[in-house]
Every structure is written in structure tokens, then in C-alpha cells.
Image (cartoon, rainbow, N blue to C red):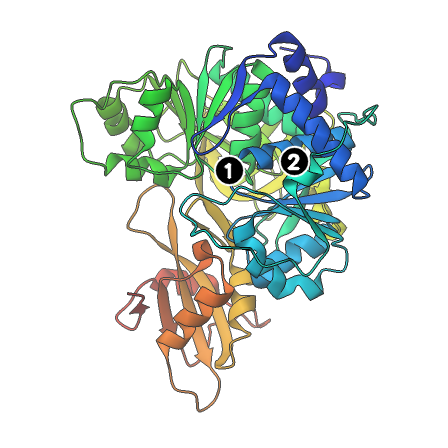
Amino acid sequence: MDRSVENWVLTHQLTRQAQERPDQTWVRFLTGPSLTYSEADAQAHQVAAGLKRLGVGFGDRVAVWLPNNSSHLLTWLGCAFRGAIHVAVNLEYQGSFLQHVLTDSQARVLVTAPEFLDKLNEISDTLPDLEWVVVTDEAAPGVPPRARPPDPLKPWQPFSTLMAGLPLEEDPPVTYRDTASILYTSGTTGPSKGVLMPHAHTYLFGLGTIENLRLQEDDCYYVCLPLFHANALFMQVYAVLIRGATAVIRERFSASEWLADIRTHGCTVSNALGVMVEFLLRQPSTPHDQEHQLRVLTSAPLPAEQVEPFQQRFGVPSVLELYGMTEVNIPLYSPLEAPRPGSCGKPWEAYFEVTIRHPETDEPLPPGAVGEICVRPKQPFGFMMGYHAQPEKTVEAWRNFWFHTGDAGWCDAEGYFYFQDRLKDCIRRRGENISSHEVEAVLLEHPDVAEVAAVAVPSSIRGGEDEIKLVIVLQPEVAPHPESIWNFCEQHLPRFMQPRYLEWAESLPKTPTSKVQKAKLREKGVSSQTVIRA
């Protein structure tokens, strides 16, 4: 692979592949057109020219709020050719969550689909930086057709018009040090934080997949995770681009279609999340479960008790756990030759250092001792550059020259690392990290709620999944009405943030400094007083 960091730029990689393998398929969408490397290169240049006509310059932000389709990838690529910064937007966002990402990132252009315009119009007057909305012609499968989508309350144009002009005469210079993307990750004490990701950082996500999974040109990657996350976009699709392989992309994960897709398209590599492995194991067994070419599946997390049953049933040679975050890349991979069930792997030592430190003193801990997983890069710009517009959060995370992940873990004497739990008040559900603070901030807008705490309770589904429990103190003289809370959550929270459990309380347990003692609420879990959503 290319070891010259000067070439660790998205545009360099696509241009190289368009020259070396112009007619090879890069991505094949199950519900849309495929793209060869040369088609992707030419169309991305057209998008870049269209962005220029909209006034987008070097370093400007372009938000992408799209499902897994070709327009999503072409906008990502077009931003790189223009020198603009791609801002990924979670499809589930609405209301204050959507408003926060668009205003915090200062996005000047939003590229979205017709089915999202109603949600956009609800907050349109709170987006002072947004100048243009570009609307694709691609509606998500299963979305009912409409005679005409509502016009955005901002100047807009169709995606086809964006691509109608001539390509740029010359691409602006982009280096591995320049910011490529901003992805928003869950905050625990405030709104979600925008992770500033330089080109070298996003490249290393892909290079890690190539080197640690031994991705080859004849591999076919099955991608069923959302492109607004680093896993699908950088670890999978970008890895395929760098290696010159092929990706097959489904809009969203389907446990019932997963094996059929992999078999039909000859897929050899794929990524999952822990809960997905559980869902696959729950599918009815058939005599054809091992009729496929899949050679490696990665997951994070991956409970040790799922590895052997999965391999025995589906016959996948390598089922591996890894560990990473948007901020720190993927510093831990399970070795292909010597995975250890329950371990998330060993450090990718060429580019990262990983250590276990005391969460209060930052002192290094010996093998076997549980502490905080801390990471730092060896490659300049191979890590995030900071949290957008939150320097104090950047410094807090980077204290004592180590990035503090907020995750508890330990390391054995042979250098294998083990993820144990989260140190922060963060909830993991449906493959998303959820900020308890953000859930609470929304519930406090309900007129009946005086105080609220959102905590994780274990899900019946294995794979590191949580359910959300709300503990609510009502306003004086207000009677409990669970349905009012459930309806409010449906209207104001993304689906993956909506709670399953609810409990009323006279007061919340607090420290002498008035901080809610969430550990006590988590320990109580689901009790006879808990209301369970039907």
C-alpha cells in the first residue's frame, strides 16, 4: 500500500483508481445505480463544480442528510474535490438534534432527499448559515411516493441541476492535513460534539481494514451500515476505494436478507455491530447457511459467547472483534491468525499506542487491572484534530497527552485488550451512542416534567445493547400520564433515542453538590414500579 502520507487524500485515491481500473465497479447499490471508478471520478467532479456555483469554497461545510445511495457518495467525493468539508447527518435526527448539527457545523449547503423536507422546514428559520438546499431525485425504498415534495423554506435546486455544469478546470490543492469531514458523536455533559477529521485520519480508517483484514482487489465488501457513520463510510467504502476492490451496499441492515445478499453477490468481507450478530443467530436455520464466500466478519462489540455459535452455523473462517471511536480511529484489531474470543484485539502498533490508565490519576495500570482505555497516534493528522468549536472539550479529552475514551477495559499479559463497560453516562442502543444529557434536555421541555434522568438498563438482546429508562419527577400537582411522555418522545426524539422504560419519582438521588447519582438509578434497573412501553 501507499506509504506516502502526501497521497492520503480522498481525491488522490479516487483519481488513481479511475486511471488504473476505470471500468471496474467500485460500488453496487441494491436499490440504485452502480458506479465504476471512472464514473465516480467524473460525476464527483461535476458535483464539485456544482458546489462552486452555489458559492461553496475551500473549507466551507456541506451537510449530507441522505440514505445509502449514490448521491450520498458523490456528494462526499465532490466535497473533497472542491476542498469543502463533508458534514454527516444522522437520518434519525429531527427538531433540536437536526438544528444543532446544522448550526454548529455552520453548513452553507444541505444535500437531502424529498422525504426529509418536512422535518427540515420545521426548523428552517433557525438555520442562519444555511444558504442552499439540494434535493435528490432518489427517495428511500418503501417511502410512499408523493406528487410533489414540499419546497424547502430556503433556496433550493435538484441534485441533477447541481451536476449539470462542466467540471472544474482545476481542483484546489487539498492535503492530508486539511479537514475532510465532521461527524457528530454523542456528548455526555452537553450536545453532540463535531469531530474534526483530517484526510489522513479518514484514510487510516480504510488502511486499517486493508492491512488487518488483508483486503484484496478481488474482495467484495458487503456494506449494510449507514454511510453517515465512520464504520460504513471510512472503514468499508473508503477501504474498498483505496484497495481497488468492490462494495455492495444495502440501504439498511436486514437480518432476513443478510445471507441472501452475501450469497447472491459473492461478498467476502463485512462489518457488523454486536446486536446484529445476535439478530442473525435468531434467524431460522437452513441447510444453506454455509453456502457463501464470506471469509471474515468484524464486529464491535462482539460477545465471546456468540463467536463459536456463529462460526459453527455460518462457517465464516474469521469472526473478529475490534475497538475504535470516531475520534481515535480503530487502534485495536483482533489478529486474523490468533483471535481471542472476548478480546477486542491488540494495538495496530504501526500507527497507535493504547494503554490502560487509572481513570482519576491517569497513572498506568498493570495487566489485569481495569481502568480507562487511552489512545494516542503515531502518525501526525492520523487522529481527530479536535471537537468543532469546543476547545475545552478537546483539552479535557486530551489531558496528559493521551486521548481518554471514557471506556473501561483491561489488558492481559500477552497484550490483548478487553472492553468492559462505559465510564461515562452514555447509552448504547441500535448501534448508536446516545447522550443521556441530550435525552434529558428534550424531556425537560415537556410541561409536566420537573426533573428527569435517563439511564441505561440491559437489553434482553446480547451484543452490548442497552434500553433507555427515564426516571421523572413531575411538576407539583401533576398526575402521571405515561402516554403523554411516550407521545412526546415520538415527536421530539430520534427513534433510537426513544425510551422503553419509565418510572416516576418524588426526587432524584443526588450528591452534596447536586449531581444526580445515576449509578443508583442504574442499579435499581427495572422494578415493579417501572412502566414498560407496549
Q: Where does residue 173 sit, x and y in percent of width and height?
A: 83, 25
Q: Is residue 406 above or below residue 166?
A: below
| Above/below status of 465 relative to 532 | above
Mark identifier at residue 364:
none
What residue sits right under mark 1 in the picture? 68
Residue pictured at 60% horizontal, 57% vertical: 98
Quadrant the C terminus occupies = bottom left
- The crowding category of the residue bearing disc 2, from other C-alpha atoms within 10 Å (few below 14, some 14 to 19, many at least 20), is many
Residue at left offset 57%, top offset 72%: 514
In the figure, residue 35 lies in which quadrant? Answer: top right
Q: Are marks 2 and 1 in contact (CB under 8 Å)?
A: no
The one of 263 and 179 positioned closer to us in this rendering: 263
> Which circle marks residue 75 in the picture?
2
Q: Quadrant of residue 467?
A: bottom left
Where is the N terminus found, in terms of image quarters?
Answer: top right
Identify the element where label 1 is drawn. Answer: loop
